[in-house]
Amino acid sequence: MNISIKEKILSQLINAKGEPVSGQKLADELNISRTMIWKHLKSIEEDGYVIEAIKKKGYVLQSIPDIVTPEQIIPNLNTKQLGRTIDYYTTCESTQIIAADKAREGAPHGTVVIAEEQTDGRGRLDRSWNSTANKGIWMSVIIRPAISPQFAAQFTLVSAVAITQAIQEVTNLTPEIKWPNDILINGKKVTGILTELQADMDIVHSIIIGIGVNVNQELSAFEESIQKTATSLKIENGEEIDRSLLAAKILYYLEKYGDLYVENGFKPIKILWESHNCTIGKRIRATTLRETLEGVALGITNDGVLEIKLDSGEIRGVYSADIHLLGKN
Ligand code: BTN
């Protein structure tokens, strides 16, 4: 990873946790003049950071802007590969499109594309995804697991488990997963995941995991048509959440559970998914491309397929569908 001098200075200020960092020490360590240090500090301030200069002591980071730049995410990151390359945009059409192009061009495993705002965010089933500026996590992660294409869909469930765990840790809220990978809090959708596959018949080239988390929106940020079904973490727990910390935690759990899946198969993921799910045992309506099925969700198979017991008693497996929870069976 190529870290710029500006990033190194910022990283030192962040790691000092409110203690002064000496300008001379920075200059010596980075082998540049005090004037250059001062110029980098000005540039950091232009990005929205507030830095106080204390005579004879050094520079103290007083406040950080609410942005999801690599400089903000990387100090919180505890991963080997995921998020070690981050491509950041203040605005873009869709991180998913950029990530797909990058994956085709050979971007390494773990590359992240993240934006403050998407003007054409994409959802599942060709829907659009509301991506308000500076309020959510809109990111796409390129992974290159050594698995065959038939198992790629299971990564959707791996991602749902990882994000649920990250939200739980950062907020103390208790999210639930609606099959396959919608994350709900108090029955309302807070996160959507869109996984796309680039593969040949027998080999996965990459999986692009598109993650949209509603973090700090007020209810009015959502279109009226979805205000009853969508929510944000802030609406649910009443406080602003540090988006870069949450993004780093998501990447941490995505790496952890992704590795667990590749090494030990779907079984441990299935157990975790089941422990967070709110679909099994409920009466549901499943709308697939071909038909609409109503019945009781029995569980997921070892391939992640949802099994539904229809009113006729017949048991059907669903690979991909839009699920509507109808209540208890
Ligand atoms: C869903 O419909 O539930 C999936 C929504 C996925 C949204 C994310 S935001 C980041 C990435 N870029 C996109 O355009 N979509 C995904």
Image (cartoon, rainbow, N blue to C red):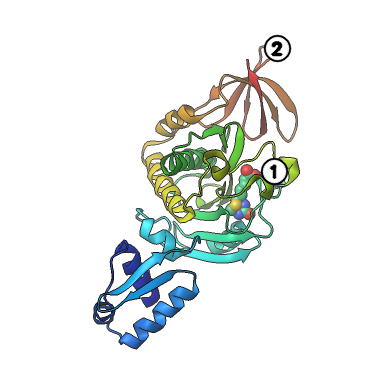
Mark 2, ligand 1, within 8 Å: the answer is no
**Residue 313 in picture, x, y percent from top left:** 66, 12
Residue 92 lies, with reference to residue 326, above or below; the image says below
From the image, tell me which residue sits under label 2: 312
Q: How many labels does the image show?
A: 2
Q: Which amino acid does label 1 sit on?
A: Leu
Q: Visible in this render: residue 85? A: no
Q: What residue type is labelled 2?
A: Ser
Label 1 crowd bin: few (<14), some (14–19), many (20+), radius 10 Å? few
Residue visible at 41% across and 45% down in the picture: 253
Residue 230: quarter of image: top right
From the image, tell me which residue sits under label 1: 125
Residue 294 lies, with reference to residue 170, above or below; the image says above
Q: Going by the image, does 258 lie left or right of 313?
A: left
In depth, the one of 266 and 178 nearer the eye is: 178
**Residue 140 in picture, x, y percent from top left:** 54, 55
Residue at the farthest top position: 313
Q: Going by the image, does 131 lie left or right of 168?
A: right
**Residue 186 in picture, x, y percent from top left:** 57, 31
In depth, the one of 155 and 61 nearer the eye is: 61
